[in-house]
Amino acid sequence: MNSKQCGLNTMKWFLLLVTVFLAGCMASPAMLTGAVNDELNFEVDKNTAYISGILNSNLVSQLSDFIKQNPNVTDLVLVDIPGSVDQHATMEGARLIRRLGLNTHIAQTGYVLSGGVDLFLGGVERTIGAGAGVGVHAWSDGSRMKAANVNVADSIHAAYVNFYLEMGVPERFYWFSLDAAPADRVYFLSPEETYDYQLATQ
């Protein structure tokens, strides 16, 4: 990444920290998503790709095309990922990353929120930079369906649980994320929590 982009990312992260501090470790996704480009952007430096933007329904094809064009890439660094608009596509994107044997890393001055966390989990090896933000909340389909309103025995919960188990993350992380914050807020995990829930592999 060039110095200008690093400076912008540092400024965005500073503003993010201020927001989190003022909100008592809770922040509005709408406030956070306004700080980055909605388009998913890839930048390559040798065998590392830096990714920023919102994850959408085209995620799998975007990742597939990108890796075909850059077969030397072995590591994906998530810089600013404020979330996703298609959870199914996000899960499939994570599975693709796992099948390709790629590693994921959250940039030291970056953050991943909501579906961005799920994409991160696709990495074979997963690392989190010091001071990086990892934010979760209860899911919602954007209208009336919310996790809090769905019976715990509903199969939709099983789809999430199975995904996390597939990624090597304990089931309890899913239930924790539902209780951590409502759909319109974000809870930032402490470094201890990210390791307790096995989000990072080292």
Image: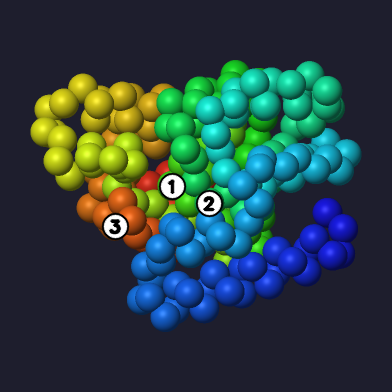
Q: Are marks 1 and 2 in contact (CB under 8 Å)?
A: yes
49 left or right of 134?
right
Query: Which amino acid type is marked by label 2?
Result: Pro
Q: Are marks 2 and 3 in contact (CB under 8 Å)?
A: no
Residue shown at 45% from the left, 72% from the top: 20
- Crowding at dot 1, Cα within 10 Å, few <14 / some 14-19 / many 20+, comes out as many
- Residue 113 x, y percent position in the rendering: 48, 51
Q: Are marks 3 and 1 in contact (CB under 8 Å)?
A: no
Quadrant of residue 152 within the rendered picture: top left
User: Which residue, given by chain and number where applicable, does mark 1 sit on?
Assistant: 114
- Report how far apart the C-alphas of labels 3 and 1 lie in the structure: 11 Å
Task: Please give the label number shown on residue 63.
Answer: none
Per the image, label 2 sits on a secondary structure element best described as loop
10 left or right of 73?
left
Per the image, label 3 sits on a secondary structure element best described as loop
User: Which residue, given by chain and number where applicable, does mark 3 sit on?
Assistant: 181
Per the image, label 1 sits on a secondary structure element best described as loop
- Report how far apart the C-alphas of labels 1 and 2 lie in the structure: 7 Å
Quadrant of residue 102 within the rendered picture: top right
From this viewpoint, is residue 93 visible? Answer: yes
User: Which residue, given by chain and number where applicable, does mark 2 sit on?
Assistant: 82
Q: Earlier in the sequence, mark 2 or mark 3?
A: 2
From this viewpoint, is residue 127 visible? Answer: no
Residue shown at 24% from the left, 30% from the top: 157
- Report how far apart the C-alphas of labels 2 and 3 lie in the structure: 15 Å
Task: Decide which of 1, 127 is in the foreground and name it.
Answer: 1
Task: Decide which of 107, 40 is in the foreground and name it.
Answer: 40
Query: Which amino acid type is marked by label 1?
Result: Ser
Task: Decide which of 117, 65 is in the foreground and name it.
Answer: 65
Q: Earlier in the sequence, mark 1 or mark 2?
A: 2
Query: Which amino acid type is marked by label 3?
Result: Ala
Q: Is 72 rendered above or below residue 19?
A: above
